[in-house]
């Protein structure tokens, strides 16, 4: 009954772990490892956002009739995350640890308060609203 | 629409000024407590200056921040907004702040009319908060954080009822019941403060620190601790010391277990960067574990007769080591983040993303400033502890240390908000650039 919540929550945690590795590599000024870890982290994060924006949110909006509320806030925060990821990538290219770590801290807090809203409310409600169709929708999300 | 969907309105978050004004004012009320302690140099646990200064810290700093955070955190974590946050929030915060000042100075200076005004203002503010807080947490009861926050608000009702009875005694309206002081204190620290901290930590520790989740048994600890408080209170009231010892033991074990579980999680954190907030959690949890263990030993009669000095020392570790430290640590994060999010939303709203750059969190509140303030806090904690045990001139010195600790915190937070205001002016100029006023 919690297919979407379980999968997406686990993916949040995986993103967090990759984030922590990239952050640690920058703090240690190991720039090559940092770039590798950062790209791995950014790649999974962006794919996760796509899963939501292209599949989950449209389904959620269609089932609940809420197209002007929570998903608007979620999409806006996604855009803010993308902007921070771009800024972190630029800082990495400049080898600017202070700039990277400042953006990383900002990204972390923005993302965690965002994830709480999804994990505690939006995902469980999506599973509930989708009912028996949740596995099919999750399958479509995983294809991205 | 599916059931409960009406609650899910993240666009109905309280305006940023609701929690922010509480966060910015609170450190200066705490500093006023330090000034009061330095000015009166009280001796003894029941000295008026000490009770007054303590309440500026517990009401003016701790409770004011906790109330402000409650309005902000509950909707984020549970999707349930606090009813009336927009209008009642500022009114409740103003009431708690002014009430704390009137009660603190009224008690310390023996000014009965000031104390009377404070009692009434605080009673109204806390009653208002309790009603909206209980309604909101009842709606959020399916969430472990929502449940813990509900227990915290319920405990606050007990703290406030006993506090008002005691204050009425100080104001000379009813006989002063000194025997209720410990009950008031226990519900304040183990009920109101600890339940709220536990509830918030279940979310923020695993997520912000990148640690494993709290074990399932830890999520029931707020209920265990508050249940223990009920048993302890019933045992004391009935004069049945056996029952009181059992209840007190449950409270002490519950708090210690929670503190140790948190320290274990922090030791397994995946983020490796040194961070003041993380260090604040460590100091706070170590203090809580110490209070729990010493409390348990005292219950068992193993150290038993340390007397008033030992009680004061334990109180210092509970209030300043556990509660004040963790609240200061959280403020370092939440104040710059709320400033940043507010600005970032303005930028997005006006389609200025990529065209206007605003400062990130580290530039809003540089880590060096927070680290310096944290060191001052640890020093102040040490001095206050010495003052509790040694007394004498140390008490006034402790007051000065506390005033510096809180004022420096307030200064750092205000500087972050001032930097955000500079960026806001840049955003406003850019908005005016795209939408030039008619005729220009």
Image (cartoon, rainbow, N blue to C red):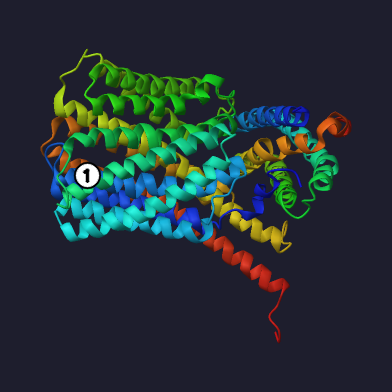
Q: In the picture, which quadrant includes the C terminus of chain B? A: bottom right
Q: Judge from the rendering whether residue B142 lies leftward or rightward of residue B88; answer left or right.
A: right
Q: Residue at x 85, y 43 (%)?
A: A54
Q: Chain of mark 1?
A: B
Q: Judge from the rendering whether residue B104 lies leftward or rightward of residue B17; answer left or right.
A: left
Residue underneath mark 1: B166
Q: Residue at x 59, y 40 (%)?
A: B77
Q: Residue at x 44, y 31 (%)?
A: B281
Q: Position of residue B271 (x, y in %)?
A: 58, 28
- Visible residue check, residue B363: no
- Visible residue check, residue A8: yes
B258 lies above or below A50: above
Name the quadrant containing residue A16.
Answer: top right
Q: Position of residue B417 (x, y in %)?
A: 49, 56
B33 lies above or below B113: above
The one of A120 and B214 positioned closer to us in this rendering: A120
Q: Secondary structure at mark 1?
A: helix
The one of B244 and B281 positioned closer to us in this rendering: B244
The one of B364 and B239 positioned closer to us in this rendering: B239
Name the quadrant containing residue A127.
Answer: top right
Q: Position of residue B131 (x, y in %)?
A: 45, 49
B403 lies above or below A121: below
Q: Residue furthest front?
A: B238
Q: Residues within 10 Å of mark 1 (few under 14, many from 20)?
A: many
Q: Position of residue B326 (x, y in %)?
A: 42, 36
Give the total number of marks visible in the rendering.
Answer: 1
């Amino acid at each position: 009954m919690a297919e979407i919540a379980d999968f997406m929550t686990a993916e949040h945690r995986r993103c967090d772990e990759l984030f922590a590795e990239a952050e640690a590599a920058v703090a240690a000024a190991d720039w090559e490892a940092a770039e590798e870890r950062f790209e791995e982290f950014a790649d999974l994060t962006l794919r996760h956002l796509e899963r939501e924006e292209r599949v989950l949110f449209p389904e959620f909006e269609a089932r609940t009739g809420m197209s002007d509320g929570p998903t608007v806030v979620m999409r806006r925060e996604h855009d803010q995350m993308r902007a921070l990821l771009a800024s972190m990538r630029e800082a990495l290219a400049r080898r600017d640890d202070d700039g990277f770590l400042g953006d990383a801290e900002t990204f972390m807090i923005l993302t965690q308060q965002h994830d709480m809203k999804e994990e505690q409310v939006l995902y469980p409600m999506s599973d509930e609203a989708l009912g028996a169709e949740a596995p099919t929708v999750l399958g479509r999300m995983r294809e991205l | 629409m599916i059931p409960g969907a009406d609650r899910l309105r993240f666009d109905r978050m309280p305006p940023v000024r609701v929690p922010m004004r509480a966060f910015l004012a609170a450190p200066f009320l705490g500093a006023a407590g330090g000034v009061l302690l330095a000015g009166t140099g009280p001796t003894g646990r029941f000295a008026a200056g000490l009770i007054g200064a303590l309440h500026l810290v517990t009401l003016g700093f701790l409770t004011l921040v906790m109330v402000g955070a409650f309005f902000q955190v509950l909707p984020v974590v549970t999707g349930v907004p606090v009813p009336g946050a927009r209008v009642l929030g500022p009114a409740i915060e103003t009431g708690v702040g002014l009430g704390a000042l009137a009660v603190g100075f009224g008690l310390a200076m023996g000014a009965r009319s000031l104390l009377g005004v404070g009692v009434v203002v605080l009673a109204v503010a806390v009653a208002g908060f309790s009603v909206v807080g209980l309604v909101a947490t009842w709606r959020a009861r399916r969430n472990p954080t929502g449940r813990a926050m509900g227990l915290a608000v319920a405990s606050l009702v007990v703290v406030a009822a006993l506090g008002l009875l005691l204050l009425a005694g100080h104001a000379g309206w009813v006989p002063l019941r000194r025997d209720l002081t410990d009950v008031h204190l226990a519900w304040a620290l183990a009920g109101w403060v600890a339940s709220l901290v536990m509830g918030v930590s279940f979310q923020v520790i695993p997520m912000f620190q990148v640690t494993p989740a709290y074990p399932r048994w830890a999520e029931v600890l707020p209920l265990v601790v508050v249940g223990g408080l009920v048993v302890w209170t019933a045992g004391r009231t009935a004069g049945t010391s056996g029952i009181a010892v059992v209840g007190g033991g449950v409270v002490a074990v519950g708090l210690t277990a929670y503190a140790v579980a948190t320290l274990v999680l922090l030791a397994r954190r995946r983020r490796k960067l040194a961070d003041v907030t993380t260090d604040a959690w460590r100091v706070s949890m170590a203090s809580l574990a110490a209070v729990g263990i010493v409390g348990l030993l005292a219950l068992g009669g193993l150290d038993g007769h340390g007397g008033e000095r030992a009680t004061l020392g334990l109180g210092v570790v509970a209030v300043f080591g556990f509660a004040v430290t963790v609240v200061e640590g959280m403020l370092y994060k939440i104040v710059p983040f709320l400033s940043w999010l507010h600005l970032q939303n303005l930028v997005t709203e006006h389609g200025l993303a990529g065209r206007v750059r605003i400062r990130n969190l580290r530039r809003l509140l540089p880590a060096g400033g927070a680290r310096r303030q944290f060191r001052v806090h640890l020093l102040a904690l040490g001095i206050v502890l010495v003052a509790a045990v040694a007394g004498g001139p140390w008490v006034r010195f402790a007051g000065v240390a506390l005033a510096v600790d809180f004022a420096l915190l307030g200064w750092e937070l205000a500087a972050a908000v001032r930097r955000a205001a500079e960026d806001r002016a840049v955003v406003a100029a850019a908005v005016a650039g795209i939408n030039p006023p008619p005729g220009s």
